[in-house]
Amino acid sequence: DITDRKQMEQDLRASKELLEAVFHATLDSVQVLQCVRDAAGVLLDFEWLLTNEAAHRLLQRLDVRGRRLLEEAPAMRTNGVLEQFRRVVEQQQPVNFELLYPKEGRETWYHIAAAPFGDGLVVTWHEITARKQATAELLHLQRAQQQALFNAVLEAQETERQRMADTLHNGVGQTLYAAKLQVDQLGAGPETRLRASALLTDAIRQIRTLSHELTPTVLVEFGLAAALSDIGRAFSSRGLRFQCFIDLDAEPPLPQPLELAIYRIAQELAQNVVKHARASEASLAVETVPGFVLLRVEDNGVGFASTPAPGAGIGLRTIRDRVALLGGTIDVGSTPAFGTYVRIRFPTPSASEQV
C-alpha cells in the first residue's frame, strides 16, 4: 500500500544518503569511470562519472564529471595506468598495482585498486608514501648493519692474517734461514749440501710468498691500483699471461674496507684462474664509473658447462656472499673450452655517506 511504499522510499533515501556520506568521508580517492569508445567500439579513453572529496584533492579539481581521463591527466598514457584500466575492462578482472605519481609538487606513492563496473570501472587510490619511506629506511638500516658486520669481520680477518704473516716471516722464516746457514757450513758432500740448501731456499721463498698473500703490504703503502697490478705480476708465469687494466679515479676516495674487499675478491678470482682454469691468458680489469666500481676477470681456459670445479665453486660462493654484503651484483659466465668471465659491480658510497 501507499504507507509501505513511502517507507521503502524513505529507507532507500536514507541508504543512499548513508552511502554518499561514506563515499565522501573516506580518505582514499574513489573514482567511477566509464569507457569512451569510437564508432567501431574501440576503447579510446575513460570519462569520470563520479568522484569523492579525496579524488577532488588528488586531481586538484572540484568537479571532473564528464571530463576525460587523458585530457585531465595525459601522463596516465605513459605511466601504465591507462593500460591497466584497459585490462580491467577487457578481461573483466580486478587489478592492483603501485604507482609513483606527483601530487602538489611532490612525488607520492599510491596503491591503486581497480574493478570492473558495467562498461567501465571503479578505482581507489590509497597513498602509501609513508610505508614506502619506512621500508626504504629499514632497508637502508639493514644494509648499514650488514656493512658494519662485514667491516668488522673483514678487520678481524686482516688482523689474524697480519699475525700469521708476522709469525711466518719473523718466526718460521728466520728459523729456516738460520738452518740454511748451518747447512751451508756442514761437512757433507757438495751435492748433499746443494740439495739441502735448495730445499731450504724454496721453503723460504714459499714462506715469503704466503706472508705476502696474507697481508697486502702494497695495498697499505701504495694503494689499490698498485695492489691490483701486483696481483697480475704475482700470478703471471711461463704458462700464463695475466694482464691488468686498472683505471681508478674515484671521488671521493673509496673507503678502506671497500678497497680491501675489492683486493681480496680480485685475489681470490686470480687464484681460481691459476688453480682451475688451465688458461694461457687471463685479464683483470678494474675501473670506476659514476657511483660504481667495476671489476672483471676473464680467462681463455677450459671453462665449465653449469657446475664449476669443486674448489672454484666454493670460492665463487664466498665471493657472491661478499659482493651481496657490499650491495653489489655479480655475473658469471662460461663456455666449455672457451673460458670464463666474472663481472662484479660494487656501489660506491657518496661523500655524505662516508662522513
Image: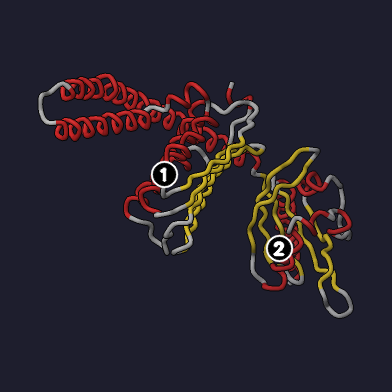
* 341 relative to 141, above or below: below
Res 108 → quadrant = top right
Mark 2 element type = helix
* 352 relative to 206, above or below: above
Q: Quadrant of the C terminus?
A: top right
Task: Determine which residue is flagged by label 2.
Answer: 84
Q: Is residue 344 left or right of residue 4?
A: left
Q: Residue at the bottom extreme?
A: 40
Q: Residue at the front extreme?
A: 190
Q: Residue at the left extreme?
A: 187
- Three-letter code for the amino acid on which mark 2 is drawn: Gln
* 55 relative to 67, above or below: above
Q: State the separation of the CA atoms marked 1 and 2.
A: 60 Å
Q: Position of residue 180 (x, y in %)?
A: 20, 24
- Residue at the (41%, 50%) spot, across then down: 239
Task: Determine which residue is flagged by label 1.
Answer: 237
Mark 1 element type = loop
Q: Residues within 10 Å of mark 2 (few under 14, many from 20)?
A: some
Which of the two residues, 285 or 136, is positioned nearer the viewer here?
285
Q: Position of residue 140 (x, y in %)?
A: 54, 35
- Residue at the (72%, 52%) spot, across then down: 23
Q: Is residue 305 left or right of residue 189?
A: right
